[in-house]
Image: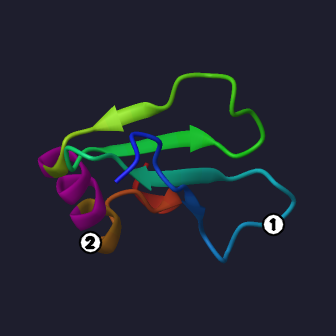
Amino acid sequence: MSDAPQYVRSSFCAGGACVEVGLLPAGQVAVRDAKDHSGAPHVFTPHEWDAFIAGVKAGEFDRESL
């Protein structure tokens, strides 16, 4: 596996205002701005990413909850 992650973006992305997510070799998850690849990605441990996804699925980040 290469050190550079293969990034993907959501099928819900429209107009380029999106984030891209890539899996790093050590299992960490990298998140970057789809419009600007020059900046360093935000990197999360598998535990942090799983907790975030669980929160999304539970509705914790819905606009009404913020």
Q: Position of residue 6 (x, y in %)?
A: 51, 56
**Mark 2 = which residue?**
58
Q: Residue at x 18, y 55 (%)?
A: 51
Please identify the residue farthest to the right as the structure is shown.
15
Please identify the residue farthest to the left as the structure is shown.
47
Please identify the residue farthest to the top as the structure is shown.
39
Q: Position of residue 32 (x, y in %)?
A: 56, 39
Q: Please state which of the two labelled residues, at mark 2 or mark 1, is closer to the viewer.
A: 1
Q: Position of residue 9 (x, y in %)?
A: 61, 63
Q: Secondary structure at mark 2?
A: loop
Q: Residue at x 35, y 34 (%)?
A: 43
Q: Residue at x 41, y 42 (%)?
A: 30
Confirm whether the magenta stretch covers residue 52.
Answer: yes
**Mark 1 = which residue?**
14
The residue segment tinted magenta is 47-54
Residue neighbourhood size for the residue with mark 2, other residues' Cα within 10 Å, grouped as few (<14), some (14–19), many (≥20)? few
The amino acid pointed to by label 2 is Ala
Relative to 22, is 15 on the left or the right?
A: right
In the rendered image, the vertical position of residue 58 relative to residue 33, given as above or below: below
- Residue 2: mark in rendering: none
In the rendered image, the vertical position of residue 61 relative to residue 25, given as above or below: below
Relative to 47, is 62 on the left or the right?
A: right
Residue neighbourhood size for the residue with mark 1, other residues' Cα within 10 Å, grouped as few (<14), some (14–19), many (≥20)? few
Foreground of the two, 43 or 13: 43
